[in-house]
Image (spheres, rainbow, N blue to C red):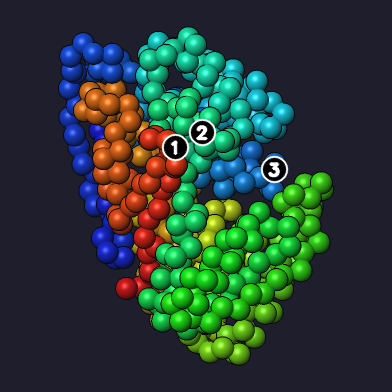
Amino acid sequence: MSKRKKWLFKSFGFLLFAVLLLPLVACGSSTNQNQAGDWKLGIMATSPEMIAENPFTQAGSDGQAYFMAKQMQAEFGEEHIIIVSPPNRYMAEQETTMNLVTEMAEDPAVKAIIIAPGIPGTYLAISTAREIRPDLLFIVGSPGETQQSIAHISDIALATDYSGRVPKIIENARAMGAETIVHYTRPASWVSPDSVEALKLNAEAQGLQFVEVTTPASGSVDSPERTPQAHDRLYTEIQSFVSEDVPKKIADYGPSTAIIGNGFFMLEAMLTQTMEHGGIFPAQTHDTGFGYSYWLPEALGIEVPENKQAEIPWIHQEVNQLVLENGWGGRIATWPIPPNMLFVQAGTYYAIDWIDGKIEDRNNKAALLNIMEEISGVPVGLSEYPGTDNYYLYLSEPIIFGR
């Protein structure tokens, strides 16, 4: 079997370790063990083209899962990794999604299939594929259907623990020296009022002042006018407001002010204005640090070459160097890796270990956790969604640049 590569980070120096070469040998005769080379793994991931044509979509955050799928294909070979993308209109074309997954399942060499994000139609696709291939291993990342249904039809499901992020964000801001939290939200946001209230309660419990700011917005992700033009208007409107308001808030509350927002539209302006005016930019509620055209390095003027788009350690190293050069050490934080990227990479490594017989159980939480921590380079938590034993809520520690 091809070489296996695991990225390891060092404590925020973000050094990329060497690739570990693990020779893999053929195992016995059980259903999850195969002759060396006689295996394939399918990955369904939303492509960057799909995101470009549907700028309001939340599926995939700029094709992150697809970038990682391509990296897995480069690592293990095109003869082993099959990549397909769902239709652009996946909500209306769930049968097409089903056909794409079923087509992969019909190949007897395919032993496992990863779907990330798990767009609507995933349940139908897996249940249909299982009718012809009950032996297949299915891993779903960021499911877009009910937890119970995906837990029932998949072997492993992975989702971000957004509720668990709330106390982490406040702890992170406090550790960076924050005394005041300024939180920007916008009308018709997909972030629930409960999440905002949880941020406020956690901040106040830790002795931090909490200031809520609502941005004006002429549209939303739920607007019937879901066009590139509407997207651009909304983006410009929110960026303009945030660019003007953040300096005022830092002037009002001082350099120990942490700026937090709940939408991708505002993050670039928030970061640049926070750094320019001496505030604190902790890990964000729904941000991965790299979604929507890798806004974090882009906002800092760092170009991410095409061949580095899935190499998060390289991006970390570049961001960390620039942060230190500008004297921003300890003032910028983010999450270690986009969840969909992690779900594809960890899912691939897990599935290949299962195919090779190194993991015997379809659902081995300890093995999965070990793989995810090796990739992330920080402590990772996996908690079972209530009523399931295979639907895991993923939570990690944030990383602080320049420390």
Q: Position of residue 58 (x, y in %)?
A: 62, 46
- Residue 54 numbered mark, or none: 3
Residue wearing tag 2:
148
Three-letter residue code for mark 2? Gln
Task: Quote the CA–CA distance across marks 1 and 3.
Answer: 34 Å
Q: On the picture, is 307 further left or further right than 377?
A: right
Pointers 2 and 1 in contact (CB under 8 A)?
yes
Lower sequence index among marks 1 and 3: 3
* Callout 1: SS: loop
In this rendering, is residue 306 above or below 79? below
Q: Nearer the viewer, residue 166 or 298?
A: 166
Task: Kindly report which numbered mark, 2 or 1, lies closer to the viewer in this rendering.
Answer: 1
* Callout 3: SS: loop
- Residue 387 numbered mark, or none: 1
Residue at 28% from the left image edge and 26% from the top image edge: 361
Q: Position of residue 282 (x, y in %)?
A: 47, 70
- Residue 170 numbered mark, or none: none
Three-letter residue code for mark 1? Gly
Task: Quote the CA–CA distance across marks 2 and 1.
Answer: 8 Å
Q: On the picture, is 371 further left or further right than 261?
A: left
Three-letter residue code for mark 3? Asn
Task: Quote the CA–CA distance across marks 2 and 3.
Answer: 28 Å
Residue 79 sits in quarter: top left
Task: Kindly report which numbered mark, 1 or 3, lies closer to the viewer in this rendering.
Answer: 1
Q: Position of residue 351 (x, y in %)?
A: 33, 29
In this rendering, is residue 278 above or below 333? below
Q: Circle 3: is it few (<14), some (14-19), or many (20+) Cα within 10 Å?
A: some
Task: Kindly report which numbered mark, 2 or 3, lies closer to the viewer in this rendering.
Answer: 2
* Callout 2: SS: helix
Q: Nearer the viewer, residue 184 or 113?
A: 184
